[in-house]
Amino acid sequence: MPDDFSLIELRALHEIARVLCRSSELKDQLQQTLDVLSTRLGMERGMISVLDLQTGEAWLDVARGVDVETGQISYRPGEGITGKVAQTGRPMAIANLGKETHFLDRTGARKSLNRAELAFLCVPIFYQGRCVGILSADKLAHQVEEIGEEVQTLSAVAELLGKVVHFRAVEEENRRLRRMLAEAKRPTTNIIGRSKVIQEVLRLIDQVADTNTTVLITGETGTGKELVAKAIHENSRRGSGPMIQVNCAAMPDTLLESELFGHERGAFTGAITRRRGRFEESQGGSIFLDEVGELSPIAQAKLLRVLQEREFQPLGSSRTVKVDVRVITASNKDLDLEISQGAFRQDLFYRLNVFPIYLPPLRERGPDILLLADYFVLKYAREFAKQIKRITTSAIDMLMSYHWPGNVRELENCIERAVLLSQENAIDSWHLPPTLQMKPEGMQNVSRGKLEALTSAFERDLITDALKDVRGNQSQAARLLGTTKRIVQYKVEKYGIDPRRFRAKQSA
């Protein structure tokens, strides 16, 4: 390290060295380093970029005096001053930033400044002979006596940062690999949801999919048990084989045996041809027995034999058919209760319940309601060729407060109806069915509040939706609502609405 530093510069370097010795987070150490450069050496708008170990791109990690989210800005090798320093490994100094054509100002931090008054310094950060990052900062030009000395000081700081920046790159690489691994483990499925209970269902699907284990899916009607069964089949080694679905509740006992196991010609009146059963059609794939709790005692006994022996005899035949089939079943009934009442065989239950998956009702999946609603809005808007893009605040409140006894199926039906009724670009509360406006049983006597309170809530929702549409512009919101800007301003203040947050969301 050079020995011609001033006392101020030496104190700054000493303070940075102390920062880097602390047992704090690496990113915090880098941020504190930029703070020292600003307070001790007058360097403004400092940035530290880290080189991606795979691509060689420099991505902004920490910054000071720059209003931008770190990690969102990157420079390819040779792109702009930062990219050139990363590519060449040599520092660059610009005494007059206004005359530099290669300066990108991708952060936009200097748009409102006179660049001719700024000097810009950019130096590489090395670790074990390899460039691992970039340190840059600008300084008021009149404060720069000798730009070479400024580069020398910043390069000395870069030498101190080498190890920390290298480990920051390693940290981010590990985080990226963990994220890729987590995404790779997530099974391919049409199940929509981010709630913890659905993430647990996806974890169970991932564990059991690539096996031959029999699965029993339980849950209320309309929760999506069929989607879980499809996900198990499609993510298994049998995914290229057939998946045959049988609704046990929709089939009379007289036909069930023939439907599942097939029959020979003449086996019964009307059997004019030989027919393969659903089990035989599923050979090499999976069979999904939905509502298995509806099977009759006779059908239960035959299904038990297939599960135990992996073979069966078609109706009216003496031949034995061996099957290589993965059995997935589902029931909306409490099979334990059915067993206690003698309606379901206990030995069959044990065969089916090898790997149980419980699918929670929609009322227990709060975070997923809006996610599913948005998905169905897009689906039916495309199907009906409508330009519906969002759900209003009042409709969202109604969706979130409803108890959804029909689960996801009921939600889909509600959204389909709302899309058909809407003549605008949004789903509003009056487009939803009347059932969503009714309170659950036992809640009817709860006070609904005064008329004034309800009117105020509706008025607040109208103003909020109008401000969303015009990105927080109160004058345009007033025109949309057919009133004056003065009244909108009064109501905004009365209801505590912050129009700035809609501008922030749009710009983000």
Image (cartoon, rainbow, N blue to C red):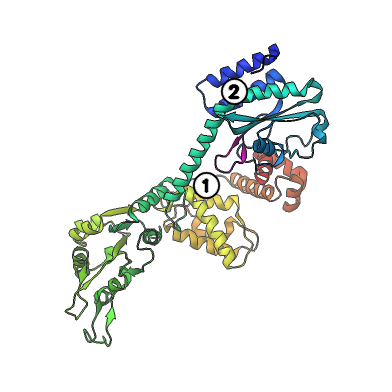
Instruction: State left or right for residue 240 relative to residue 258.
Output: right
Name the side, left or right, on which 299 lies relative to 439. left
Is 50 a magenta residue? yes
Q: Is residue 266 above or below residue 363?
A: below
Residue for point 48% across, 58% down = 411
Left-right relation of 43 to 159: right
The relative height of residue 271 versus residue 90 in the rendered view (above or below) is below
Q: Quadrant of the C terminus?
A: top right
Q: Position of residue 49 (x, y in %)?
A: 62, 34
Tell me residue 74's x, y (percent). Answer: 64, 41
Tag nearer the camera, 1 or 2: 2
Q: Which mark is residue 448?
A: 1
Element on which disc 1 rests: loop
Residue that numbered label 2 is attached to: 160
User: Can residue 167 be found in the magenta stretch?
Assistant: no
Q: Residues within 10 Å of mark 2 (few under 14, many from 20)?
A: some
Magenta residues, as a range? 48-59
Residue 144 or residue 359, whichever sits in front: 144
Q: Compute the Cα span from label 1 to label 2.
A: 65 Å
